[in-house]
Image (spheres, rainbow, N blue to C red):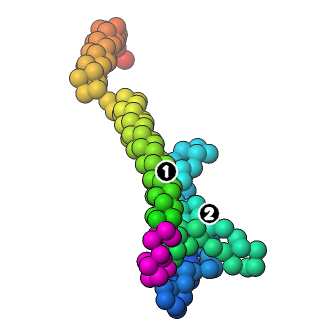
Amino acid sequence: YIFSGTLIDTAPMDKLGNGSPPVPPTKWYGNSTVFEFEVGSNFNMPVSVDGTRLFGIADNGDGTQSSSFFNTLHKLSASLYNGDADQTNVALEEIEGHMDNVLALRAELGARTNRMNVVADQLENSISNMKSNLSDIQDADIAEAIMEFKSIQNVYNAALSVGSQIIQPSLVDFIK
């Protein structure tokens, strides 16, 4: 259940009650805790919508809750069932207010989605930069390594040549 907060295995409200028209639910079983993802150091981004804000859940003071959204739908259903045009118009005006609420929450969710995309792009850039820096540190430049090896090899050969000329055997060495 996507509007039950973190209680995803629990239906947020009772089903419609019996009657003509059906009675709106009166008990909210969800919670108002939203899901958050950690997207940075000490930075969590909410990724869900609070069902209590979406449906206008209010405590009735007797252990039950009412939803202005479902009550409006009930009012519209009852006015249509009874043929009361004035109540139907009132209910339709209330529905427009609920639609504004849904659009506002949708805009918030869209803004969070955009922020998540920006954070994802920043993380991808950071990963790319880190890999590039690690490559610069760990990887050897083949041409530079070969040149350095040849230079060291030439110094070594020169040292051997000089050493062999210094220690040339003399006639005294052969007499011994």
Residue placed under numbered mark 1 in the picture: 104
Snapshot quadrant of residue 43 = top right
Q: Residue at x 46, y 65 (%)?
A: 89
- Residue 27 % position (x, y): 63, 79
Q: Is residue 140 visible?
A: yes
The part of the chain drawn in magenta is 77-88
Q: Nearer the viewer, residue 34 or 71?
A: 71
Say whether residue 120 is magenta: no
Q: Is residue 85 magenta?
A: yes
Query: Would you name the residue on which mark 2 appears?
Result: 33
Q: Secondary structure at mark 1?
A: helix
Q: Position of residue 126 (x, y in %)?
A: 43, 36
Q: Quadrant of residue 12?
A: bottom right
Q: Is residue 9 above or below residue 55?
A: below
Q: Quadrant of the C terminus?
A: top left
Q: Residue at x 66, y 75 (%)?
A: 65
* SS for callout 2: loop
Query: The residue under label 2 is which amino acid type?
Result: Thr
Q: Are marks 1 and 2 in contact (CB under 8 Å)?
A: no
Q: Position of residue 44 (x, y in %)?
A: 57, 50
Name the front one of labels 1 and 2. 1
Q: Residue furthest bottom?
A: 18
- Of 1 and 131, nearer the camera is 1
In front: 112, or 151? 112
Residue drawn at the location 54% of the way across and 44% of the way down: 40
Q: Amino acid at mark 1?
A: Ala
Q: Give the Cα distance between marks 1 and 2.
A: 19 Å
